[in-house]
Structures are given as structure tokens and as C-alpha cells.
Amino acid sequence: MISNNSLDPNPRNTEFSLPALFSRMRMGAMLRRCGFSKRSGASPADLLSTVLMAVLSGCRNIWEFFESRASMGCGASRDAAYRFLKDPRHNWDALLLRMAVFVCGFYKSLEPEDEKRVHVLIADDTPIERPRVKKCQCAFRLHNHVNGQKFKGYLQLSIGWSDGVSYVPVADAITGSLKERHVVAQRQAPSRDGRTACAKARADMASKTKPQVLVERVGRALKAGVDAQYLLVDSWYFSDDLFDAMEKMGLGVMTMAKSSVMFGEIKGCRRSSQERLRARAAGAAPVRKQEVLTMIAFTKAGRRVRLVFVTKRGKPDEFITLVCTDCSLTAEEIIRLYSRRWMIEIRFKAQKQWLGLGSECQGHLFETVHSQMIISSMRYMLLELNRRIEKDPRSFCSCCRSIREEMREIPYREALHSLVLLLSSLPKRLLDKGIVTARQAGEIEDEIIGMLGEWLSGVYDYIRQLMEPAMGLAARSRSHFKELERRPGLAAQPFQTEN
């Protein structure tokens, strides 16, 4: 579906061929369902292909793409692409979700039927800095909890799906702050119609917190058909409200807990610090000698959870605490599943470094910023799909499995018999089609019989040469035992063989 052979570390050198992929996804119908339509000019599918290829062709943004030779033969103009990105009727969130459902279904079809693989949703946010912005409709003064500094820009809340092998972006949302003093520019711009998709996304940014947007987007993804059993988040999202909301949707939650969070050993009793609980989980053994400890505890609201204490490498006094609402899982399973959360960090780095996230769009309209954010996630999805198809050997597991099953059902005797019959019937087929005469068909039959005889004699000679050393050893062993029967005094001597 995609022409390049590997996921280049620099996707700007990667060339895509999207028509086959768009045809398989039925992209035209998918775009119409998401509100993408045009009365004349380039089709929405051609415009989407153009904006997706702008950065992947080696350009930094769409303007540079149309100024370079990479746009030669492109069926769309620069102004048409700009109008396509800022049209408020286009539902970019629905388009990303529909593409994600298609790709997730493709990945699930590659899994072995006898293997029940666990699927998870991963959620996190990343800061997008716009330091010189003054009029951007979605810019805030926010705090970066990673480096502890203030910045101007917005937060991208992202949700992805993973089967342990690949990562698929499912939903993206722009979030900021609900406090007016943190708003850099006018938050609500005049809109012609408040019922459009972008108007609703802007309303969510202005009226909902990050946990609320997270719960809403997770519910939307599950309703669309994304299959998952757990939600993986970092310590910032740890709360009993999130646990309750995910439980109603049938999802378990795995998260880290900040060092200040306290848990109770018994429901309703006084809570203790994580250091004391870790020492209690260790029991009589020293804590430093145990890298992983686990126990059942209760949160502030009385929810029963499993705590997993993981000691940091080289620092036996420091540890992290993982919290899982599914107490039936073991500590090893929780650690293995939670390690998938690192995939979203890799996604953020790849999108910011290569796929134009935060650097491609310098527009001020909310619609433009939102659409460029979704397009960056679509590029990552396509690159990951290409990597899975072209490089990952597990992509061909279904084909290999079916071939192995067919080969097991055919015994070697029947296979050899059918092969000999096929070769023997070749002269008759050639004679029936008039390709050879009767005399030539007889000569071909004699030649085939001779070749089969030579092949069988060669196989017999190969087996005989292979078995001669073993047969010689067996003969010497038999003669030795006969000698022992005649001379009992030789029974104590060991039997020696030649090297």
C-alpha cells in the first residue's frame, strides 16, 4: 500500500504512494461522512494527500512545499490547501478516529487466532510552545511540569492505541487553562455557526478540563469500535474520579502514583505513606534485595487497587509506585503492560522532530492549528503502518500460519505420490494439446521415468552414506557383545569406538 521499504529515521526522505491506501480505506466516503466536501476544483482526497505529503517530501511547511519542485504535478493550489485547513465544517477529529479504527482492525487481523493479546489505550499531553504569539486563538500562559518553566502556547492531549507492537493515534485535543488570566489572546473568536465541528472543539477547550476531555475522548473511541482493556496514564491523571469513569466504560486503569499519595492497608482505616507500605510488603526480607514488591491497598475513596513498587536501577533507596485497578494481574504483567506507555513519548518526539508538530503551523486561527495537529498524527499513523507492513515479520504471521497448517494436513507420502502423478501426467497433457506427437510423448515419459529413478537412487545413496558410520558402529558393538558372551573375563573392559 505504501511504496517505501522502511521507516527512515528521517521521514523527510520518505516518499509515499497514497492512492492504494486511500482506496482501501474508501477515503472519499470517509471524508464525506466527516463533513469534507467541495463543489469544484481539487477533491478533498487530493487536498488531504497534498497536506500529508508536504512535510514528508522534505519541506518544513506547506508554503515551502508549493515553492519547491516537490509540488510539480500537484493537483491542488496553495490557496486551496489553506482554505482546506481552516474550513470550520471539516471534522478532523472524526476523520482521525475513523482512520484509527481501520488501522487497528488491520493490526488485529495479523494476530494469531490462538493468542489473546491485550490492547491498551495510552493517554498523555505534550506542550506546544509558541513564544512570540500574540493573536493565536488557542494560546495560553502555561506551566511545563517537566522542566518547571512557564511558556506560551497550548497543550496537545493525545490518546493512542497499542497492541504491544505498534502504536496508532486515536484522538487529539487542544487544551489549555480555564482561567482568563492565562489566556494570551481572545479565546472565543466570532463564528458563523456554532454547530460546526471546530466550534465544538473550541468550546471543549474553553469549558472542560484535561481529565474531562480525556474521559470524553476515550468514550468516543470505544463507541467507534476501538478495542482496549486498559488505559495507561502518568501520575498527573491519578484520581478516583478517573478510576470510576473508566470502570463504567469497562476499562482498567494503570498509572503511576506521586510520592505524596497515601494508601490504606484496610478499607476505611488510616492511610500510610508509600515507604511504609513498601516495607510492609517486603515482610521480613530486606527491602533493598527485592526489586519488585506488590500488595493490595485502598485509595482515599476506598477503591481496591494493586500497588507495585519497582526499585530504580543502581538506586536501591528510590522506587516508583504503579497502581492498577485490576487486582487479578500479577506484578510482572502490570510492569510489562505499563511499559507500553513509553510509545506515546516516542510518538511526541517523532512528530515534533520530523512530522511538523508545533513547527509547521504558524497560523492564528484555531481551525488551522487544530487541523495541522491532526495531520501530524495522520503522518505518524502512516509511517507506523508502513513500518509494520514492510519490516515487521509478524505482519506476515497470518499467511505463514495458514501455510503451516496446510502443510501439516498433507502427509509426506501423499505429497510425494501427488508429485509423481503430476510429473507422469505431463506427456499425456502435452499430447492432448497437440504440442508433441505420440512418439515424442513416449520419449518424454521414458525420460521422466529415468529422472525419477535417478532421483530415487540418489536419495538412497545419500541415506546409505549418512547411515554407514552408524551401521559400522552397530556392527562393531554387536561383535564385541558376542565376544563377551564367549569370554566372560572381557566383561570388565569398556567398549571403545573410533573417533
Image (cartoon, rainbow, N blue to C red):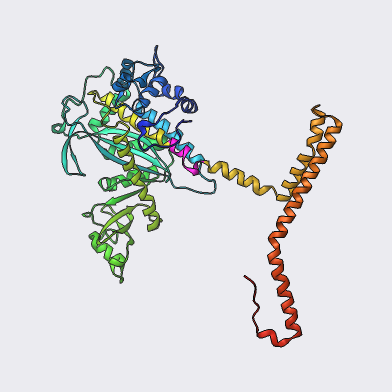
Tell me: 441 left or right of 41: right
Residue 53 spot, x, y in % from top left:
37, 26
Residue at point 32% right, 32% down? 355
Above or below: residue 257 compared with residue 80: below
Nearest the eye: 30 or 386: 386
Q: Quadrant of residue 222?
A: top left
Most foreground residue, 272 or 6:
6
Would residue 153 be seen by someone viewing this image from the given angle? yes
Asked if the stretch drawn in magenta spans residue 393, the answer is yes
At a point 47% along the width and 37% down the height, the residue shown is 390
**Residue 36 rendering spot, x and y as whole percentages:** 38, 20
Q: Looking at the picture, does residue 414 appear above or below residue 91?
A: below
- Frontmost residue, 8 versus 103: 8
Residue in the image at 62% along x and 46% along y = 405
- The image position of residue 227, as x and y in percent, is 44, 41
* Left or right, 132 with reference to 193: left
Quadrant of the image occupied by residue 474? bottom right
The magenta stretch is 385-395
